Image (spheres, coloured by chain):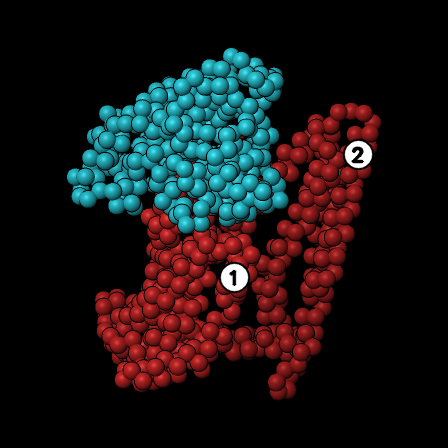
Chain colours: A cyan, B red
């Protein structure tokens, strides 16, 4: 699915080039985990994303905001190659995780997805028990050597997802029997259980009530200590609350990205200004 | 009775009534009063009320006309004929009717027969005219009353809706009553069979040799169900062993791996298999598959007959493949894409995802498909008639010929049958057994499929 870019810039040059997206300077930048350069995505003939370049720093939360249909999910799905599963989807440009191209033909997307986990918009627990939901990933990747290993992984993942105290007595009941907010935390636990380095979340709170949302936001803030997180959200307040950096997408372009407080107080681009003040979107 | 004339008269009346209702309600609407229902409803209502009484009259005649005619014929016959035995009387009446219809009879027609036929001819013409006239008159009365009811406040629309509902209920009642009727007659005849043979001998007997009704064997034959049941189950099991893996794999391939283009070509071709008449499968089994399997058998040193449980089972399995594949295809497709993405997003490969998430999630539906396929296999007749060898003995070896419940029903009911002998009545007991088995399987399948549906709502 990887199409070599038809630009004259060789891959290595593309990689070392600075992102040209409008951005306000950052005083003490964190090391970059995910680096994207000139990423374009096509669904069949239709181009959904135009030359997106961005750096995602580690151990922080990066929020993608923008009006519906601007390509946030599309770009997010590029980061763990979930777009591969979509018929007729084509990605060009460069995306690197820790300096290596994730679209390199020698790289196995299956391995990549174990390193870059994903939480979806709607909670989608498997129709299995709570325990089996969390154990699913570790079992596939052979992360647990024994039954007690697996128990430990399940417990610590549920702990980190803030769900342990609520479900510890009913681990063998169906995951689908939990409430929406609990299901979403179960999906987060499931993603954490394979010890990913990066967690991608596509509108993880859109199906939840304010209390469950607050719980998840708290959780994201805690997870930031150990993981690199990218979150798509339609709520400006949520982006402001949980993220350190914010990227604003519009019509398939990355318009502006920078530290969240600066984006929300003094954006460089007029389009960003208009969007965050609610003039459109 | 001349159906074409009656039908065209009815149509004419229908059209006239509709037109009348339409123009009357139309005028009312044009005159500016606010009317409850649109003219089309008023018109339909008038047409309905005109048609209903006419149809009732015709229906009554269809029900009782024959008896009336019969009584009339009997009245025409001399007493020495009417005092004949019932069977002979039947023959005479049939002959008279044949003469009347101009069909002719075997042998010389008697004078009393001819005169009775002549009288019958007149009677028919008269009653026909009378019935049609009555129908027309009642129709006209209905029409008149119905059109008088037309007024702005008449809730014609609600009335039409009610009528439509009653008609729909009527149609489903027909289907239900048919089922009930079939079951009742099965039960009654099976019960008669059990007056000859005890249910214990039937359900637990291990020997099937019913003898022939012509020899008047009475209850001397042996009616053990078990050899037939065993044959049925063995053939069905072989069929499922062939169809389940192939059908399921096909469904998985089509839903998970095939591109839309391949799918668009492969799916109709597989479904074509379901359209082949079973008799064609039957001689395919007999002519091609049987000898082929026998050949393989002799090459391996196994004794496989050309007509055997194996032959019938394998071919039946091929027949059931599309059944399993398209049902499984549906249930696999119903597993939400989010489930698949969730698994892939955790770094599972496609085959791991299918094995550990998609199939388990679709499992209840697949089990439902499986049970429906089993009931299909148990009820299948033509293939086993031709290819199973018709040999009702308890044998373990699938390479030997067997007989099944369905085949035996065919055997017991073909040729000269006398529905009072246990030899043919046993067919009803067998049919009942088959019916109960497939009913249980179907109910179980429906139950499982329904429970599964609730899961993702
Ligand atoms: N599978 C697909 N096939 C074709 N076009 C697609 C597909 N998925 C997305 N698109 C198109 O790509 C564009 C970007 O879609 P995307 O889902 O990335 O938007 P989004 O920013 O996530 O929107 P939202 O906020 O509504 O989720 C849209 O114009 C959409 O119609
Ligand atoms: Mg989206």
B170 relative position to B376: left or right: right
Separation of marks 2 and 1 at Cα, in angstroms: 56 Å
Give the quarter of the image for residue A219: top left
Residue B344 vertical position relative to residue B112 in the rendered view, above or below: above
For image coordinates 22% across by 42% down, the residue present is A144
Task: Count neighbours of disc 2 (C-alpha within 10 A) and say few if under 14, some if 14 to 19, many if 20 or more.
Answer: some
The image position of residue B430, as x and y in percent, is 34, 68
**Which residue position is annotated with label 1?**
B266
For image coordinates 53% across by 47% down, the residue present is A3
Front residue of B217/B158: it is B158
The image position of residue B357, as x and y in percent, is 35, 46
Read off the chain for label 1: B
| Whether residue B173 can be seen here | yes
Give the quarter of the image for residue A51: top right
Of marks 2 and 1, the one in the foreground: 1
| Whether residue B388 can be seen here | no
The image position of residue A268, as x and y in percent, is 57, 17
């Amino acid at each position: 699915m990887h199409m070599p870019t038809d630009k004259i810039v060789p891959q290595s040059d593309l990689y070392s080039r600075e992102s040209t997206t409008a951005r306000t300077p950052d005083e003490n930048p964190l090391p970059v985990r995910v680096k994207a350069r000139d990423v374009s995505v096509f669904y069949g003939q239709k181009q959904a994303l135009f030359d997106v370049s961005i750096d995602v720093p580690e151990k922080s939360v990066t929020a993608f905001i923008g009006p519906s249909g601007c390509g946030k999910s599309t770009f997010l799905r590029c980061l763990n190659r979930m777009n591969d599963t979509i018929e007729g989807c084509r990605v060009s440009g460069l995306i690197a995780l820790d300096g290596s191209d994730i679209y390199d033909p020698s790289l196995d997307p299956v391995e990549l997805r174990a390193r870059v986990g994903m939480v979806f918009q709607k909670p989608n627990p498997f129709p299995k028990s709570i325990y089996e939901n969390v154990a699913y990933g570790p079992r596939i990747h052979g992360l647990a050597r024994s039954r007690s290993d697996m128990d430990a992984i399940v417990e610590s993942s549920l702990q980190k997802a803030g769900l342990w105290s609520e479900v510890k007595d009913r681990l063998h009941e169906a995951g689908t029997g939990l409430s929406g907010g609990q299901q979403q935390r179960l999906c987060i636990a499931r993603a954490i259980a394979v010890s990913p380095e990066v967690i991608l979340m596509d509108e993880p709170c859109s199906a939840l009530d304010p209390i469950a949302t607050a719980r998840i936001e708290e959780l994201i803030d805690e997870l930031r200590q150990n993981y690199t997180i990218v979150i798509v959200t339609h709520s400006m307040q949520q982006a402001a609350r949980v993220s350190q950096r914010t990227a604003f997408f519009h019509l398939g372009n990355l318009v502006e990205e920078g530290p969240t407080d600066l984006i929300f107080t003094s954006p460089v681009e007029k389009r960003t200004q208009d969007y965050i003040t609610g003039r459109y979107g | 009775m001349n159906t074409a004339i009656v039908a065209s008269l009815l149509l004419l009346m229908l059209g006239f009534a509709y037109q009348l209702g339409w123009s009357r309600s139309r005028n009312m609407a044009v005159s500016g009063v606010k009317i409850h229902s649109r003219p089309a409803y008023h018109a339909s209502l008038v047409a309905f009320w005109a048609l209903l009484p006419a149809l009732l009259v015709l229906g009554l005649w269809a029900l009782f006309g024959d008896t009336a005619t019969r009584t009339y014929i009997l009245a025409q016959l001399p007493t020495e004929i009417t005092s004949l035995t019932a069977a002979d009387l039947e023959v005479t009446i049939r002959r008279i009717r044949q003469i009347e219809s101009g069909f002719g009879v075997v042998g010389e027609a008697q004078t009393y027969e001819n005169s009775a036929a002549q009288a019958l001819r007149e009677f028919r013409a008269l009653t026909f005219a009378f019935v049609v006239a009555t129908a027309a008159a009642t129709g006209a009365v209905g029409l008149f009353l119905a059109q008088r009811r037309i007024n702005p406040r008449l809730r014609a629309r609600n009335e039409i809706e009610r009528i439509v509902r009653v008609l729909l209920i009527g149609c489903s009642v027909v289907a239900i009553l048919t089922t009930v009727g079939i079951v009742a007659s099965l039960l009654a005849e099976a019960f008669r069979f059990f007056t000859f043979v005890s249910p214990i001998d039937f359900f637990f007997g291990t020997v099937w040799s019913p003898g022939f009704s012509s020899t008047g064997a009475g209850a001397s034959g042996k009616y053990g169900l078990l050899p037939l049941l065993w044959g049925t189950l063995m053939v069905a099991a072989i069929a499922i062993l062939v169809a389940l893996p192939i059908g399921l794999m096909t469904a998985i391939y089509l839903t998970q791996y095939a591109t839309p283009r391949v799918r668009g070509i492969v799916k109709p071709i597989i479904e074509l298999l379901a359209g082949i008449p079973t008799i064609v499968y039957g001689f395919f089994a007999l002519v091609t598959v049987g000898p082929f399997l026998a050949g393989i058998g002799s090459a391996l040193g196994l004794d496989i007959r050309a007509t055997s449980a194996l032959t019938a089972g394998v071919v039946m399995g091929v027949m059931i493949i599309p059944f399993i594949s398209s049902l499984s295809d549906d249930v696999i497709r119903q597993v939400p894409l989010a489930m698949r993405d969730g698994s892939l997003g955790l770094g599972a490969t496609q085959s791991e995802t299918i094995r550990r998430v998609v199939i388990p999630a679709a499992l209840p539906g697949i089990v439902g498909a499986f049970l429906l396929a089993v009931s299909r296999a148990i009820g299948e007749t033509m293939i086993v008639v031709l290819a199973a060898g018709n040999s009702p003995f308890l044998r373990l070896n699938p390479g030997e010929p067997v007989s099944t419940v369905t085949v035996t029903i065919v055997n017991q009911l073909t040729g000269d049958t006398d529905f009072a002998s246990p030899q043919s009545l046993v067919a009803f007991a067998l049919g009942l057994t088959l019916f109960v088995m497939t009913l249980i399987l179907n109910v179980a399948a429906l139950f499982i499929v329904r429970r599964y549906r609730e899961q993702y709502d």
